[in-house]
Structure formats: C-alpha cells, structure tokens
Amino acid sequence: MTVTRFAPSPTGYIHIGNLRTALMNYLIARKNGGQFILRLDDTDPERSKQEYADAIMEDLEWLGLTWDRLEKQSDRLDRYNQAADELREMGRFYECFETPTELDLKRKKQLNMGKPPVYDRAGLALSEEEKAALRAERGDGVWRFKLDHERITWTDGILGDMSIDAASVSDPVLIRADGQFLYTLASVCDDVDFGITNVVRGSDHVTNTATQIQIINALGGTVPEFAHHSLLTGPQGEALSKRLGTLALRDLREAGIEPMALLSLMARLGSSQPVELRTSMEELIEGFDLATFGAAPTKFDPEDLKPLSAQVNHARPFAEVKDEVLALGVPADQAEAFWNVVRENITVKADMAEWWTLFRDGATPLVDDEDREFIAQAFDLLPQPPYTDATWKEWTTAVKDATGRKGKGLFMPLRKAVTGRERGPDMSSVMPLLQVAPKL
Ligand code: GLU
C-alpha cells in the first residue's frame, strides 16, 4: 500500500512552500488508495509549540487535506534511542567534541586550501581516555553517523537518476550535545516504522536524502521512493524565503483566497500541465502526475490566486453563501438575487460587502462634468424604490425620450452615476436591489 507523509515542524505557521509538499504527498496517497500521515517533527522542545501544531491541523483541514493518522516525534524518543544504540553497536556512530567555533575554523581552513568543507572525522580517532577527558571538560559530545564513502544513488521521482559521493558530505550529526535527536535520524526511524513508500519534499533535502538512505540501509529498513520538488521563487525568480512569512496559509485564508484556488494552483505550478481551476478534490487527485513536474525553480506569484478565487466565486451556488449574505443585512427575499448579481463581480467573498453597502446606502455617483445636467435630469425621472427588473428599461427609455441620448452615451453615464463604477453587473438586475434612489 502507498503510504506518504507530510512532516512539518510545529515551530511556525505553514506557508505556501509547505503546502506544495503537503499536497503532493496527499495526492499521491489518495491517487493510489493509500494512506496519508501527518507527522509532527517536534523533537525540538524549545521551538515546538502546541499552538503551531493546532494551527497546522487547522490549515490542512481548511484545505481539505485530511490525514489518516497523526504521529508526533516527541512520542517516539525511546525508538530513536534504540536506533542510536543499534548504530553504536554497528560502529556507525561516534561522538565528537568540537565547539562550533572550532568547526568553523576547520571549515575555513579547508575552503582556503580549496577543499570541500567536509567534517574531518577527528572524533573518530579519539581514544576512550581522550573522550572521557573531553567529556569531563566540555560535557557530552554530539553523535555523528559514519557514512560509507561510496556513491549513493537513487532514482528521484522528479530529478531522475541521482548520484552523490558520500565523501563529499559531512557525517551528519544525529544527536545534539544536549541529547536532542535530530530530524535526520528521527525521520528515518519513522519512515521505516510507518512503512512510508513515497517521500516528496523540497530539493533543499537532497543531501539529507543521500545520508538518510545510508541510515535506512544501516537500520535494515526499506528505502522509500524519493522525489524532490523545486523550491518556489517570487515572480521575478527572486528567493521567496524572506516573503514566506507573509505567505502563511492562514494569511491567504484571511485574505479570502479560496481553498480550491490554492490547491488548483499548487497541484500544477511547476508541472507541464496547465493551471486550471478544479472544482473538487477528486478532480485534483485524478489529474495529478508527479512525473510532469520539472526540476527548475518554480515561480510563484500570489496574484495568480486572485483570478482563480474569483472563478470559484463566479460559480458558487447561493446555498453556500446564504448565511453570509443574510449576515450582511440583505433582506431575505432579495438575498439570492443579490448573490447572483455580485458573484460575477467579486474576487474574494468579502468583496460582496462593498456591493451591499452600495445598494443599501447608494453609491457616490461617478459623473463627468459634461454629464452633470444630464444626470440631474435623469435622476428626476426615476421614481423612489422599490424597483423591479423592468425599472432600468423603463427609466432609460424615459431618459432617452427626454434627452435624445442613446446607446453608450445614454447607458454608461447612468451606470456610473448609479453604481459609482464603470463596470459591474447587468443594470436591469442591479436596479431591484437598490434600497434608496440614487442622488447627486
Ligand atoms: N520536518 C522536515 C521539514 O519540515 C521534514 C522534511 C521531510 O519531509 O522529511 O523540513
């Protein structure tokens, strides 16, 4: 069975980049009738917060990305300890005592000599006595996994055939000096124990994948199929990392972006398939194909979410918004007509409030200087509300007869005067919604 997971660290709100990862893993699981696990990578007790874990779940629920199982790394420390012992017994785990400053110095020296800054395994050469002395002096060391110096290869679901020379990578630290397990080990234990078959994550994890493949093999687990999606950039190709703070899913939700708009864009952006609004999760699942994604950085423009959200609203049935429309104060017998008139003219749902204000209180008329007199005359010809579907036709006919104007010169100034805008819904449908007569 296909089993995938989305593994955010609950150290902040999830953003558009995380969504891409979550969605791909979700779609793969659903497309194959498999399981989708939400795993909270919360081994860092200082930075992990329940509040963020709750927010992540709320965001995923808002999007309809439901998980079949929830796991927390903080519940599995015994398992990680056991894996660490196994690695120790195999001679694949060793303790190191360098301070960050010392490591930094080593790296600088290597770079100066034109060498890659790979950890020199000094810790591996320490005798038990030397280690005991260092421990007494500096406290516990960090634990590193001893990589086999060979090429690590895998066929990546997006990047294709990969081959990384393990000798070009530092032995990864799996346990910090304070005893905290690092993600690299915890993730491997979880992926093996939960039977994860497919891992899609950002291309910033490629080196992790190489080292994790060796750790999985050392622990006797089955290596999942890995795929690394490209990272998102801004519309001009600029790094998005700094802006991700403003692209949290909850901010987008707050801004009125529709879930299906977000999902439709993220399920296709960076792939060879066109971005199209999908109306259901089933459609998204059906049309998803990881193989169509490319390795190049993917440009993301939040503005693209607006037309897609507008499309969702254009097609939205009244039943879905009835309560919100009534909450604005639209009379019950006009609520459906109101929605049918405004839905084609809004981007986000909240925009309908502005239209209601306009219908309820009247717009500030938009009148060109040369039309002032004409509009004054026209308004005199308009009776008090309530208006009907026929009002616009009757009124414009009367104005035409009185002024001799016709066509665009007749209709456009009237539309602008009544709605305060150059564009908008069909005026015959607008008139019955006006609660007050327009005035100059
Ligand atoms: N917690 C890791 C992250 O957010 C998970 C990476 C992975 O998918 O393995 O980057």
Image: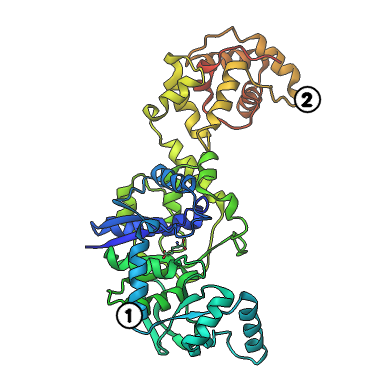
User: In the rendered view of the protein, which quadrant contains the N terminus?
Assistant: bottom left
In screen coordinates, is 404 left or right of 39? Answer: right
Front position in the image: 322 or 45 = 45
User: Mark 2 sits on what residue?
Assistant: 369
The amino acid type of the residue labelled 1 equals Ala
Q: Is residue 159 above or below residue 365?
A: below
Q: Is residue 180 above or below residue 42?
A: below
Residue furthest out toward the top: 384
Q: Position of residue 172 (x, y in %)?
A: 47, 77
User: Mark 1 sits on what residue?
Assistant: 218
Q: Position of residue 23 (x, y in %)?
A: 39, 55
Q: Is residue 219 above or below residue 76?
A: below
Mark 2 or mark 1, which is nearer the start of the sequence? Answer: 1
Which of pointers 1 and 2 indicates the residue nearer the eye? 1
Report the residue at 54% width, 84% height from top: 119
Q: Is residue 407 above or below residue 120?
A: above
Check residue 116 in the rendering and tell me which mark sits there, or answer none: none
In screen coordinates, is 75 left or right of 43? Answer: left
Q: Position of residue 209 (x, y in %)?
A: 41, 74
